[in-house]
Image (tube, rainbow, N blue to C red):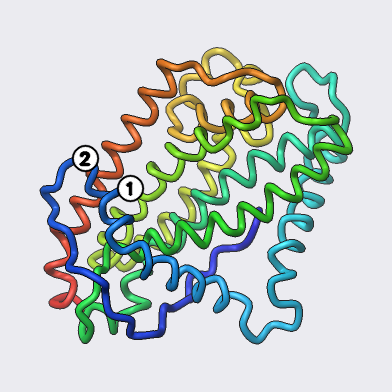
Amino acid sequence: MVAPPQAGTRFDLPIASTGRPLAAGTGPLAPLLTVWHHRTLIGRLARRDIEARHRGSALGLLWSVLNPLIMMAAYTFMFTMIFRARWGSGGGGTAEFAVLMFSGMVLFTIFAECANRAPGLMLENLSYIKKVVFPLEIMPVVVLLSALFNAAIGFVILAVFSLVVMGPPPLTVLLLPLVLLPLCLFTLGLAWVLSAAGVFLRDLRQVVTVLVTVMMFLSPIFYPVSAVPAEVQAVILANPLAILLERSKDVMFWGHGLPPVEWTLVCLGSLVWAWLGHTFFVKTRRGFADVV
């Protein structure tokens, strides 16, 4: 993975909001308006979160490069040397499998890092609940930006290895941000739900950690959906990340564009999910102070 989740990272500076929190009834665009409304504060907190991860360590930000390399080497050894896995029909070699697998790991880690951190996010920053007038709904956004920073480093590493192993990428690689958009919206919606629910359900973090691991192996990271038996494909495709992981490989390696209708539906569904998660968070945060 790009970087292990840092569940104990705190946002320790009492920074005031630049504006009042938005109301929950703003409509499906409420998540986007929240990000735009507090964009300066979000950027400052995201930078401090990234710096806090490596503060005091000897190698500092170099760990953001070493972690994905170590994980890629470990998974490649396990699946290609022990399980003799090959991508799809088996035509590709070990190096190609490593590149394709790592591309899926980079995207999945964006989701995994946010999901794993979200249940404890409010409890680790109690000062913002009890003492400071603060737009709590931006904290999952900060975590998402931190995960995207790690993913950006992972994509740079992926680009280098892909260029060596598979040659120059197709022009469709420019469509990758369109794959990341619904992934970020879906992840943000889930982070809002989990961060709010984690205040009331203290065991949620352990449950989420297990479920994220299960989702990793049920996602087309180590295999394409086409390699799964037909009777099991429905289970894999029920995973909301499956389509996005498949489409990411289409645009990065195979030169296939995004189906317009499918992409539009996925984006709309992700936006609605983000709105529902945002609304759930805003409505439940009124009880945070009473519980903590």
Indicate the position of residue 148 as horizontal and vertical percent values: 54, 54
Looking at the image, which is closer to me, 164 or 277? Answer: 164
Q: Residue at x 57, y 32 (%)?
A: 245
Indicate the position of residue 15 as horizontal and vertical percent values: 33, 81
Q: Is residue 171 left or right of residue 148?
A: right
Residue type, mark 2 in image: Pro
Compared to residue 4, the image places residue 158 above or below, namely: above
Q: Which residue is mark 1?
A: 189
Q: Is residue 239 left or right of residue 189?
A: right
Residue type, mark 1 in image: Gly
Looking at the image, which is closer to me, 290 or 16? Answer: 16
Q: Residue at x 16, y 77 (%)?
A: 289
Looking at the rendering, which quadrant does residue 216 occupy? top right
How many numbered discs sit on the rendered protein? 2
Q: Which residue is mark 2?
A: 28
Looking at the image, which is closer to me, 270 or 172? Answer: 172
Q: Residue at x 57, y 26 (%)?
A: 247
Spatial CA span between label 2 and label 1: 12 Å
Indicate the position of residue 233 as horizontal and vertical percent values: 53, 19
Local crowd at mark 1 within 10 Å, few (<14), some, or many (≥20)? many
